[in-house]
């Protein structure tokens, strides 16, 4: 910046900056990951403690909840930003995600929206069920203990099916197991410290129909980790990072009962797979989304591959729309969510879960490069052109600032009377 600019730097949104020495960006963080720190250092930001005057806070979800709590009484000024929305868990807690998507579907049904269209489908086991045509992107899921009786009723319709149990408030594969018999669930309930009794249960679980026909590559199951940046929920503004990746199991997929408890067969989490004897530390059991696209175009054809990736975008947008009305849309906040998506052998994508704090630990060289770019591009999108946090900015970055992000949706620019084509579908968006 030259001397004249230092004296009076007029920003693109019409205000005069204070002198350069007073415009230093102070950051604080309770997650000193190398991909974060190197990005902050490259911008010549200055690290301070939470008790000092900070402009940019990269915080854990717990720290963020504490900061926004009524007890803290903390109020942010116009030049402060933080990396989570106050109630980010509406999307990232497994039970709340399911609850919000179910509510979103019901609201659209009441409005008579074509998005809520239903049809009968035949499962690969032969069972005929009624499903949403456009919004069938999460497996049939129940929250336990509250929905136990409804789960039993569903289970008895197809007693040979496999279900996956996950604790609602945990991550990285902790506490997950599969069941294919009701007796196994009852046995677990008896042995658990918190049995299925609403007054006694301390932790809730979700139980979902297991996607037992996943798309396999090299005989192994995988899922997609995609990064989605949300800068506003009302109006909804979201971006998809192009450099996502596939996470592979280290052991070939096997549906036999003997392998039901083998998490190296069923769970793609790196935190699980890295402990397996077949884990490859060079590539980390990962493959880029670009290479997945090339593989699918070569084996399944370009048209169905394009349809798959369009459906993934559709899934992401409508999961965000499902929570947009309940999210505390604080202008000081933005969020990078980690989406976990499984593709079945019919090339249908399923949303498994959404993470509010996707791992920034680098397991390979390529991993580190990709995550460094993720943070760098994210900062360029959420910050005004002069790089100084200011919530009065309209959060509309120019095309150069997007880097490897693609715009998913910006409701501010959607004509409410026109059908949009997000996800390659011609159905009109809800006007909620």
Image (cartoon, grey):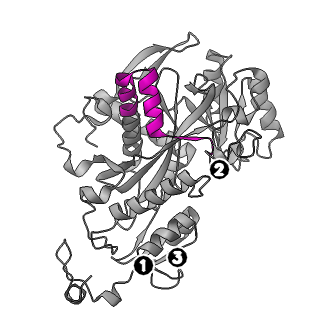
Q: Secondary structure at mark 1?
A: loop
Residue at 28% of width from left, 73% of height from top?
386
Measure the alpha-carbon separation of dots 2 and 1: 36 Å
Residue at 21% of width from left, 82% of height from top?
9
Return the mark for residue 65: none
Measure the alpha-carbon separation of dots 3 and 2: 25 Å
Front label number (2 vs 1): 1
Q: Earlier in the sequence, mark 1 or mark 3?
A: 1
Front residue of this view, candidates 349 and 85: 349
Front residue of this view, candidates 135 and 143: 135
Residue at 41% of width from left, 26% of height from top?
297
Q: Residues within 10 Å of mark 3 (few under 14, many from 20)?
A: few
Give, as a single range, the part of the protein colored magenta: 284-311
Q: Are marks 3 and 2 in contact (CB under 8 Å)?
A: no
Where is residue 127, by image quadrant?
A: top right
Return the mark for residue 72: 3
**Outermost residue toward the top in this view:** 126
Q: Which residue is mark 2?
A: 170
Magenta span contains residue 303: yes
Return the mark for residue 44: 1
């Amino acid at each position: 910046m030259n001397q004249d600019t230092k004296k009076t730097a007029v920003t693109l949104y019409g205000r005069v900056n204070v002198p350069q020495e007073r415009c230093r960006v102070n950051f604080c963080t309770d997650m000193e990951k190398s991909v974060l720190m190197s990005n902050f250092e490259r911008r010549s930001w200055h690290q301070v403690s939470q008790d000092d005057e900070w402009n940019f806070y990269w915080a854990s979800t717990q720290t963020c909840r504490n900061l926004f709590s009524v007890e803290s009484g903390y109020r942010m000024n116009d030049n402060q930003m933080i990396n989570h929305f106050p109630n980010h868990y509406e999307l990232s807690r497994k039970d709340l995600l399911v609850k919000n998507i179910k509510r979103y579907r019901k609201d659209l049904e009441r409005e008579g929206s074509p998005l809520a269209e239903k049809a009968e489908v035949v499962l690969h086991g032969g069972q005929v069920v009624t499903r949403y045509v456009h919004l069938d992107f999460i497996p049939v899921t129940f929250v336990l203990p509250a929905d136990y009786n409804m789960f039993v009723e569903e289970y008895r319709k197809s007693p040979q099916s496999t279900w996956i149990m996950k604790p609602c408030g945990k991550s990285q594969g902790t506490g997950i197991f599969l069941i294919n018999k009701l007796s196994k669930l009852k046995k677990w309930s008896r042995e658990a410290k918190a049995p299925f009794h609403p007054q006694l249960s301390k932790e809730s679980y979700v139980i979902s129909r297991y996607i037992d026909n996943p798309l396999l590559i090299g005989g192994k199951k995988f899922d997609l980790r995609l990064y989605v940046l949300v800068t506003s929920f009302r109006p909804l503004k979201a971006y998809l990072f192009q450099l996502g990746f596939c996470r592979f199991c280290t052991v070939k997929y096997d549906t036999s009962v003997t392998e039901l408890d083998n998490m190296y067969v069923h769970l793609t989490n790196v935190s699980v797979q890295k402990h397996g004897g077949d884990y490859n530390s060079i590539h980390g059991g990962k493959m880029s989304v670009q290479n997945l696209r090339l593989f699918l175009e070569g084996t399944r054809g370009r048209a169905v591959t394009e349809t798959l990736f369009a459906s993934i975008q559709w899934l992401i947008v409508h999961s965000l729309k499902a929570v947009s009305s309940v999210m505390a849309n604080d202008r000081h906040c933005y969020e990078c969510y980690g989406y976990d998506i499984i593709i079945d052998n019919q090339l249908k994508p399923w949303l498994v879960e959404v993470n509010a704090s996707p791992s920034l630990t680098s397991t390979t060289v390529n991993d580190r490069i990709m995550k460094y770019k993720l943070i760098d591009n994210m900062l360029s999108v959420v910050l005004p052109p002069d790089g100084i946090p200011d919530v009065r900015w309209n959060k509309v970055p120019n095309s150069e600032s997007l880097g490897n992000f693609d715009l998913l949706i910006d409701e501010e620019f959607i004509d409410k009377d026109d059908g949009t084509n997000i996800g390659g579908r011609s159905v009109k968006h809800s006007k909620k």
